[in-house]
């Protein structure tokens, strides 16, 4: 046997015995070689039971891959590095969400090499560490420009000080108002405001980052942390006999239950946004990606379990999208998807989670929203899309969308079940002629 044959045999052995999934493909995703671990990870995603094209298999869970490959113009190099692909939502208390990691290398003008691994356990550990790191960063870095106020058990502001006026411009008239006064009107619901207090009780703090509002209506990029004042909570938990003998001061009647700290981190926004875009945004449309959708949906479900309220999920799908690609080409198809993402963002509230979860499939989570209200806004989106053709190089291109809606009820045991209902409703909308919205029904 020649040296070349020996080298080839060694390469084949390495491919099949490697502890991670490996696959070699053409530039358009056609699989030339694949090892057993890759096949095991990818087979559940295949619609037809075959593994002929890597990009086709992954399209429903990582729609941005074709875009990344098409727009990678270097002769060789890293197309994506450890891209997280979430497959399932998992079940609270029973199983973790399943997450794959994909690294895609361009070997030359004709070949790609994919490296796949299951990082489910690693992601769980990272999430546990993430809160700790965020908490320490919030305390130890850049605290020169901050707002510090006390909140009562309902989240109402209990005091005013110079820091409030300096950073936000609000005067003492905000005393007694909910802390949502620092947020845009559609950025925080009443339920969401209480959720952050409950998160603080559960974890010791609640931390989020985003735009906050000044008294003049202008915005600034801020990190907001809420921490419970445990002494107050401990006193509230005392037996009634002990509480009855306490003086008003000892009972803490006028003491705050939470501390709210808002830090102006506008100077760090660029770095923060770059990190958010890299990890949580769909590369083509700029809205949340599949991974961010799962994380936000699971968080909302956890809050609903703790404080029952309504919640709805809408799936949207661009009708006859393959015909648009076939007739006008993929670049025009990309423009249509961007237009749909922009229309979704403009139609839904800031507190709603809008995400691209598949090739032409989009999802919207609507916190504190019942089925009727969800249908109203879904219909508004459908009419908006149908009435406004997209102009590409002077040519108007019309398209429509179909939608499926599902809402939480006692029979829904998790995110996967809710998504299945929304998907069934979407399928019904397609079956009824497209360009319509359907609500999930048991039949």
Image (spheres, grey):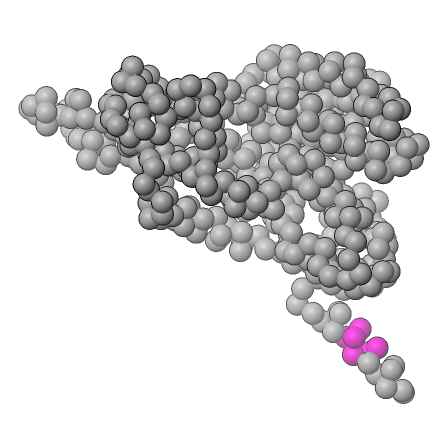
What residue appears at the point 82 percent right and 81 percent down from the top-left corner? 7
Quick check: is 11 in the magenta stretch? yes
Horizontal side of 343 relative to 263 (left or right) equals right
What residue appears at the point 26 percent right and 27 percent down from the top-left corner? 162
What residue appears at the point 76 percent right and 22 percent down from the top-left corner? 402
384 vs 44: above or below? above
Residue 153 visible here: no
Q: Main secondary structure of the magenta part?
A: helix
Horizontal side of 246 relative to 433 (left or right) equals left
Q: Position of residue 268 (x, y in %)?
A: 47, 43
Q: Position of residue 310 (x, y in %)?
A: 52, 20
Front position in the image: 276 or 2: 276
Q: Position of residue 315 (x, y in %)?
A: 69, 27
In the rendered image, which quarter is residue 353 located in?
A: top right
Horizontal side of 135 relative to 55 (left or right) equals left
Quick check: is 417 in the magenta stretch? no
235 vs 111: above or below? above
In the rendered image, which quarter is residue 361 located in?
A: top right
Q: Position of residue 135 (x, y in %)?
A: 37, 45
Horizontal side of 9 relative to 45 (left or right) equals right
What residue appears at the point 80 percent right and 48 percent down from the top-left corner? 70
Question: Quick one: quadrant of the C terminus?
Answer: top right
Question: Quick one: quadrant of the N terminus?
Answer: bottom right
Q: Residue furthest right?
A: 327
Region rendered in magenta: 8-13
Front position in the image: 363 or 440: 363
Front position in the image: 320 or 392: 392
Front position in the image: 239 or 35: 35
């Amino acid at each position: 046997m020649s040296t070349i044959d020996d080298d080839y045999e060694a390469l084949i052995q390495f491919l099949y015995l490697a502890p991670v999934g490996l696959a070699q493909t053409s530039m358009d995703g056609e699989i030339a070689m694949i090892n057993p671990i890759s096949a095991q990870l990818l087979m559940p995603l295949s619609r037809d039971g075959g593994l002929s094209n890597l990009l086709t298999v992954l399209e429903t869970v990582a729609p941005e891959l074709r875009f990344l490959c098409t727009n990678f113009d270097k002769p060789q190099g890293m197309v994506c590095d450890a891209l997280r692909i979430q497959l399932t939502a998992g079940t609270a208390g029973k199983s973790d969400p399943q997450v794959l990691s994909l690294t895609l290398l361009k070997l030359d003008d004709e070949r790609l090499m994919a490296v796949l691994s299951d990082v489910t356990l690693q992601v769980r550990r990272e999430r546990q560490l993430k809160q700790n790191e965020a908490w320490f960063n919030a305390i130890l870095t850049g605290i020169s420009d901050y707002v510090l106020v006390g909140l009562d058990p309902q989240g109402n502001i209990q005091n005013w000080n110079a820091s409030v006026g300096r950073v936000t411009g609000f005067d003492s008239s905000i005393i007694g108002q909910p802390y949502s006064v620092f947020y845009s009107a559609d950025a925080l619901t009443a339920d969401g405001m209480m959720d952050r207090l409950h998160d603080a009780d559960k974890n010791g703090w609640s931390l989020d980052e985003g735009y906050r509002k000044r008294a003049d209506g202008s915005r600034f990029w801020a990190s907001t942390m809420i921490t419970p004042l445990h002494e107050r909570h401990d006193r509230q938990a005392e037996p009634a006999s002990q509480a009855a003998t306490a003086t008003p001061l000892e009972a803490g009647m006028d003491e705050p239950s939470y501390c709210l700290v808002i830090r102006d981190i506008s100077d760090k926004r660029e770095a923060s946004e770059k990190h958010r875009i890299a990890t949580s945004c769909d590369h083509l449309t700029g809205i949340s990606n599949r991974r961010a959708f799962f994380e936000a949906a699971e968080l909302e479900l956890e809050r609903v379990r703790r404080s029952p309220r309504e919640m709805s999920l809408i799936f949207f799908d661009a009708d006859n999208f393959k015909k648009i690609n076939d007739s006008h080409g993929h670049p025009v198809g990309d423009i249509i998807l961007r237009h749909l993402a922009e229309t979704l963002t403009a139609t839904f509230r800031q507190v709603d989670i809008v995400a691209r979860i598949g090739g032409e499939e989009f999802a919207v989570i609507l916190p504190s929203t019942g089925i009727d209200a969800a249908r109203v806004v879904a219909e508004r989106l459908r009419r908006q899309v149908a009435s406004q053709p997209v102009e590409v190089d002077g040519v108007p291109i019309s398209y429509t969308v179909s939608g499926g809606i599902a809402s939480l009820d006692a029979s829904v045991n998790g995110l996967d079940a809710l998504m299945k209902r929304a998907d069934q409703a979407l399928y019904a909308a397609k079956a009824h002629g497209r360009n319509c919205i359907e609500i999930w029904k048991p039949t």
